[in-house]
Amino acid sequence: MNCAMRRQSYDEILRVPHDVARIDIPTAYADRRIGFSVVRAIKSKISGLASLEDSLGSGRLHSTAKAELSLISTLLARATYDPPVGMALQTMAAEAAAECAWIAFDSGQHSVADAYYSFGLQAANTAGTACLKSYLLVNLAFQRIEIGQTSDAFILLRAAESAAHEGQAVRVTALVHAVRALVHADWGDATACARATDSARSAIQRSEAHNSTDPAYWVTESVVEFFAGTALLRLGRAKDAIGHFEMLHSGAFPVQRYPRDAAIYYSQAATAHLKAGNFDTAVDCADAALKLLDYVCSARATEAMTHVSRALSRYRTIIPVREFLDRFQERGSSP
Amino acid sequence: MFRDERTVRHPLVALRKSASFSQPRYAEAVAKTHTALGFGHMAARREKVSRWESGRVEPELTAQFAIACLHHVPRELVERLGWPHWLHAAIGKAPTEPNLWTVENTAEALRDAVRSAQGQSRSYLTVSGNTLSSLTDTVITILNSPPVPPERNGCRTVTTNGTATLLEAHITALEDMQQQLDAALLCQAARTEVQLLAELLTDTGYDRDTGIRLHHLAARAAGLCAEHALIFGDVATAETFSVASIQMSTMVGHAEMAAFYMYSLAASHLEAGDPCDSLHLVEVARRAAPKPSPCLVTLFFAREAQAWALLGRRDAAARAIEAAFASYGSTTEAVDSDVHLLTKRWLTQRWLNCVAGTTWLSLGEPRRALSYFMPLSDGKLALSADSPDCVALELLYTAKAYLATDELEQAVRSAGHAVQMLSTLSAHFLRQIRQLFLPHQAVPRVQDFLAKLAVWDVPGSAFIAYPTSDSAMARYSSGEESCGLERSTTPVADGK
């Protein structure tokens, strides 16, 4: 990492055309004094949207998420409210933007996601919610890793860690470390990767019981292990990675609640087993992922599945592999 | 009711007007074409066109061919779709065919309704007269032979019962917000829920339980959209959403909810100035739900009271409103009814008082009406649990009652309060205010009020900007200040 990169801030990384996430605020709205009851209702809808996204995947929720953000933006711009309500609305705007960004990212629309992250970070800064700011930054870092921009991701993670510390956001801190492990893995630094994974484990053990209002509610011990497994795969240590995906089978991870995430992790597990030469288990994992795709609409999950099937296609001569590939092809052509 | 004069009920009216014909000229043109086509002589009478447009009389087939020829519609379409469905095809709208009740068709109707709500909607009701009878017959027929609960197999993606639970929470939250924010702020969120549900219903598989829940949720989301459309004065879109809600509820055999949405559809007909169709809908709704919960009974009587009042039937209206109050007394007994859960936010004594007020107002008894409307306080409005749109409408009716009793000052105050209640003035709401005060525009106080409202006109906009400060409007409506409606170029958000 050079000095020039160290000086770079996340503001510079996020130079995106803001009009991508432009919210069309009807010019007519004005003057309605709103209170915390409205904020509570909005919070309930955003939490519900996040749960829906976990369940359905991102594909069908673009308009719904945008409508939520549009409502909040309209209220922020045109309604009348007391300062505490205004702060709470800014927080809601940041949360809604995080949801919009995640949905765009999961659908493969990275530039749109960037714009929402930028919008969300502005709102989180205005609201002074360090936890949300950190959450947005770590999600953005994760997105950068997915497109191979690990240096940017590293800078974003530093900012995220600092904000998470300020906001005493334990689950977000765990996520920061887990994602950092991926960066180190991509750089081939096994020691730093292991250190980051250990830090993620320590952080998640300090976290309190599940709280659906925490934006990082989905970060659990299982998720930290899946990230660790993914990092090991990236380091080329497939055999070591296998054990980290065991929670998929043990019931520790709620597969039905997070079918999209489970599909992606099953795909990773399949890849790990394939690289380790366990063809039957690789096919079992790929099959599990394929079945979960029935429940979700997610470009990332589909891409992960395609990646596995492409890797498997090199072993077409093995009967279980061939049968799986036929099932995969059949699904691709079904309505 | 504040009838919007621009609302045209029958598609033939739209078709005739699109060709710039008056009724007499149209009668002549149809008669001439009739003869030219070799169908023989036909009397060219304006009354004939008027009867066709009322929806109660169907033209002879040869007359329909003449009309079709006039508008370049192939005979085949006339024969295949029947009256008045082919008229919709002639003016570029999909025909309403109540007998084709499938998930795909209903979901498409929902999508169509969302599209029309977002764009230029037709200005007439399509489900009126004979078409309405056809719709209600279908409802009763389906409900009498319990439909098979819907399920879909063989789809690539599946919607689970868990997802339906999450969607329900989402829609309930939106319904809760109705009491706090006005329709203009919420309509987009409601439309996206409708689109999502339409997509899940047609593009994914589900088991029977989930299918039933998805249908219910689609009906609820469409019901919200219908309410919003009605608030904006868009009766046609409200009709489409209400019909979709009726279809969704009927298809899963939920008679009480189907009856509730028929009650909702009756509102579009009242708004369009057709109390007879409104009464017909309530009558069929009673048949559809033979053992309705008390809250549904209250709603039926309330709608009947309004319809009878519009027909000038004082005794029937008075009886209906009394029955509504009596039934309302026992509404709390039915806490487990789906309709109760849906209406508990707004079906209150206040709401019923407002219905009574509008009923007496329509019957030409404004003093009696005023005794039911919310009293105007000297200062700020009393806090109300009702939605901003409902309170604003009630205040507008109050203004109308004051005008009818020659209390002009109070009328202006009431209308001012109504404006103050809303974050957005829809073009429809503004038109209602203007319609109300136009006969009194020579009075300086009214002139001043109308002039201030004119400042907010935006040509071609569905919404009209509201003054930047509610205190300015409050001062104005309380009479402290004659001019408080200066337009600001910057938005106000004093919390920031």
Image (tube, coloured by chain):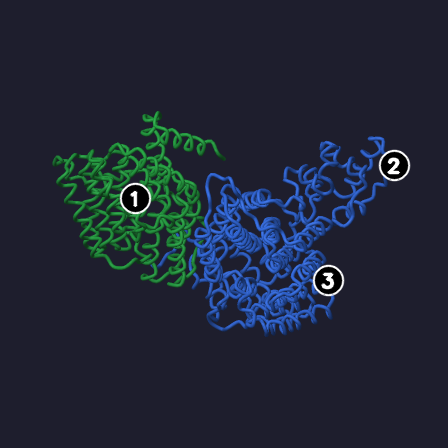
Chain colours: A green, B blue
Label placed on residue A118? 1
Q: Position of residue A250 (x, y in %)?
A: 30, 49
Q: Is residue B441 visible?
A: no
Question: Quadrant where the N terminus of chain A lies?
Answer: top left
What amino acid type should be assigned to the residue bearing mark 1? Ser
Looking at the image, residue B359 sits to the left or right of residue A299; the answer is right
Gap between marks 3 and 2 measured at Cα = 37 Å
Residue at mark 2 = B41
Q: Secondary structure at mark 2?
A: loop
User: What residue sits right under mark 3 in the picture?
Assistant: B311
Label 2 Cα neighbours within 10 Å, binned few <14 / some 14-19 / many ≥20: few
Check whether the beta carbons of the residues at disc 1 and disc 2 lie within 8 A of each other: no
Query: Identity of the amino acid at label 3?
Result: Leu
Q: Chain of mark 3?
A: B
Q: Amino acid at mark 2?
A: His
Disc 2 chain ID: B
Residue closest to the eye, B466 or A286: A286
Q: Disc count in the image? A: 3
Q: Position of residue B150 (x, y in %)?
A: 56, 48
Q: Is residue B430 above or below residue B372?
A: above
Q: Which dot marks residue B52?
A: none
Determine the residue positioned at 66% across, 73% down.
B322
Helix, strand or loop at mark 3 = loop
Which quarter of the figure has residue B493?
A: bottom left
In primary-sequence order, the first of circles 3 and 2 is 2
Q: Please state the horizontal and vertical placement of residue B337, each as a whole percent of the image.
A: 55, 65
Q: Nearer the viewer, residue B483 or B25?
A: B25
Asked whether residue A132 appears in the rendered view, the answer is yes
Q: Secondary structure at mark 1?
A: helix
Residue located 32% across and 57% down the image: A213
Same chain for the residues at labels 3 and 2, yes or no?
Answer: yes
